[in-house]
Amino acid sequence: MVQVSGQKLLFDCGPATTHKLVKAGISPTEVDDVFFTHHHFDHDSDFPTFILTRWDQNIPVDRPLNVYGPLLTDRFTNGIIDEDIGLFAHDWLARVHHPASQATYQARGGQLPRRKPNVVVREIGPGDVVDGDGWRVIASHAEHVQPYLDSLAYRVEAEGRSIVLTGDTRPCSSITQLARGADVLMMMCWETHARMSDNEELSASSSIRGAAQTAAEAGAKQLVMVHVGPRLREPKMAAARDAEAAEVFDGQVVWGEELMEIALA
């Protein structure tokens, strides 16, 4: 979640995202823009919960939900809510038409007839720009598991600041360019470089050294490690993981944890 210019932009929607947003004090109804980096389940599996919760609770205001992402984003979204093929269409159809659901809707301040979920999907690719109210999001190529899935990274610019969210990626020139001079680079970091060199993981993901090298080459001011592998989260790994990052990046490194809030200086 990036909070910018009084708005909240959600990037990916993996397991329990909706629950974690509420734990963080953020209602799904506060979110009007969702960006997907790619469509592995750990990045999109809670979207049915999010999209229906936001619609069900978004009363009496009915702002559209804007959804952006690479190829498959339209198919994935409509596969949830489309009246004919959506796997969860039965849910919202019942809530729209059953008298008891209509009564609950009116008690919350809604006026009949109740409208179906208002979702606008736009599939985007590298170089595409999404302009919002006081913010801009730039999409770029990320190298992950092509040709099976397309992947994107995003740069958010607002109020003279910039944040780059890579999603899942290995280090590559497009990510370095996207992160040039960024205030914050949030990059996937799965394992130590030595561990990942022994298998094929480096072809799709980033090591500590890879993320730190990217931050250094891009001139990013702060590096936030996310999507961190389980072994790196063990307390005994704290010193080793910091040391590997410091070998190539002398800026501030933050190891992301659930529900962590990071304020721009």
Image: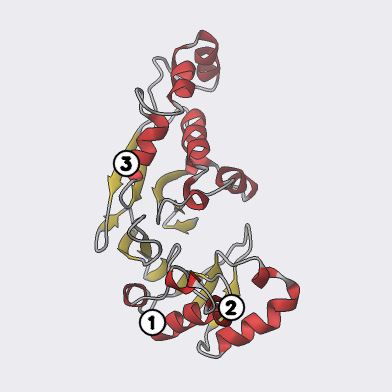
| Numbered badge on residue 195 | 2
Could you say where residue 114 lies in the image, as x and y percent from the top left? 41, 19
Which is more foreground, mark 2 or mark 1?
2
Could you say where residue 83 lies in the image, as x and y percent from the top left? 36, 23
Q: In which quarter of the image is residue 259?
A: bottom right
Q: What element carries label 1?
A: helix
How far is disc 3 from disc 2 in space, using C-alphas?
Answer: 37 Å
Farthest residue toward the right? 236
| Numbered badge on residue 264 | none
Q: Which amino acid does label 3 sit on?
A: Asp
Q: Which residue is drawn at 35% across and 61% down?
A: 146
Asked if residue 210 can be seen in this view, the reply is yes
Which is more foreground, mark 1 or mark 3?
3
Q: Determine crowd level at label 3: few under 14, some 14-19, many 20+ residues with C-alpha closer than 10 A.
A: some
Q: Which amino acid does label 2 sit on?
A: Arg
Q: Mark 3 points at which residue?
A: 74
Q: Residue at x 44, y 75 (%)?
A: 183
Q: What element carries label 2?
A: helix
Farthest residue toward the front? 199
Q: In the figure, is residue 83 to the left or right of 195? A: left
Above or below for 101 versus 13: above
Above or below for 254 versus 67: below
Q: Which residue is drawn at 33% across and 39% down?
A: 75
Q: In which quarter of the image is residue 60?
A: top left
Dot placed on the residue nearer the N-terminal end, 3 or 2: 3
Dot placed on the residue nearer the N-terminal end, 2 or 1: 2
